[in-house]
Amino acid sequence: MRTDNRLSRILHVLMHLGESDEPITSDMIGQMLGTNPSLVRRTMGGLREAGIVGSTKGHRGGWLLEKPLTEVSLTEVYAALGEPKLFAMGTSDDTPTCLLEQAANAATQNALEAARMTFLKSLSSQKVSDLIDEKREEIAAFQKRREKAQSD
Amino acid sequence: MRTDNRLSRILHVLMHLGESDEPITSDMIGQMLGTNPSLVRRTMGGLREAGIVGSTKGHRGGWLLEKPLTEVSLTEVYAALGEPKLFAMGTSDDTPTCLLEQAANAATQNALEAARMTFLKSLSSQKVSDLIDEKREEIAAFQKRREKAQSD
DNA sequence: ACGTAACGGTACTTAATAAGTAACATGACT
DNA sequence: AGTCATGTTACTTATTAAGTACCGTTACGT
């Protein structure tokens, strides 16, 4: 399959919603993401059901945040997307009769499961609002370095 | 794409090779895996180049281990397969101009990278021979439980 | 009321990639 | 010489998100 970019895309969209007081249409979001409004509606649907965003139809309709980004963890976003498949790898048969195959599958799945735990832990430690803050720090650090370089 | 099962499949095959003194043909391996010999040859090719297995043509040819499984770590096997793509997720654009998109991509990639580290760490901590040992312990524990249940 | 803007949903096509398949040249044992 | 098996190339299939098109429904604004 293609690489699943829904998580990063939606995080991107959420941050834009966080900076807007007016609804943003699927069309506009589609332009931000370089895709089309149908896909946007399909993907945002999960977030609506999860109560993260709301949508209104008709004139001046579109998408709005239902709660502040300081209260939305990345895990929540991942869950709202339906917990998309994380790995491109796996095992073939879930209940093989061959003991050696069982051992091979167990080792693979253990390693993947450990990786999934790390992934989820990383997500759970951050609110969407944190991403902006981190970026701000990064920009500040960059400007600081540049100022220093100019003074040298 | 389909799920990539090469790692677990190959681990399975290696353990069988570890229990065999004679070469095993791609045909026989194909039957173990429920697939065909061409795919086996293609997949095993990487292990040959990595020096983990050797192959001989002609009568009584096939695949043999080049070194004992006590000296083959799972990381080595993963590397020999060409480090297959681990994640089904990712980010779209590597160098977006939008700062919010950069923040979204960074968060996603950080989480994935942390997960990858955990995955590789799990692999590196085990030799292929360990998988059999663990399985033996599991079987022994199971039999012990059964014996206990019978005595009750 | 009417027209337009926007979502909601369905259905279909495209893209990417491992699996799966077929065929054949090459090499090695008996 | 004949058969067995790898090595290699080329092609098809399966899977799933992305991408696309379309239309019904709803709501705002005049």
Image (tube, coloured by chain):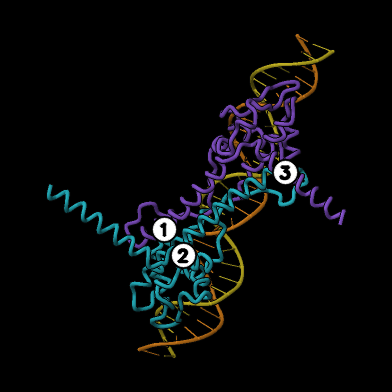
Chain colours: A purple, B cyan, C orange, D yellow
The subunit carrying tag 3 is A
Cβ atoms under marks 3 and 2 closer than 8 Å: no
Q: Nearer the viewer, residue B54 or B111?
A: B111
Query: Residue A91: x, y in percent?
Result: 44, 55
Depth check: A42 or C14 in front? A42
Disc 3, SS: helix
User: Which amino acid lies under the numbered mark 1 shown in the image of this protein?
Assistant: Ala
Residue pointed to by mark 1: A107
Q: Are marks 2 and 1 in contact (CB under 8 Å)?
A: yes
Q: Quadrant of residue A42?
A: top right
Q: CA distance from mark 3 to mark 1?
A: 40 Å
What residue sits right under mark 3 in the picture?
Answer: A137
Marks 3 and 1 share the same chain: yes
Residue B80 percent coordinates (x, y): 52, 69
Q: Residue at x 54, y 56 (%)?
A: B117
Front residue of this view, candidates B24 and B106: B106
Residue A64 in the image: above or below residue B23: above
Residue in view at x 67 percent, y 43 percent: B104
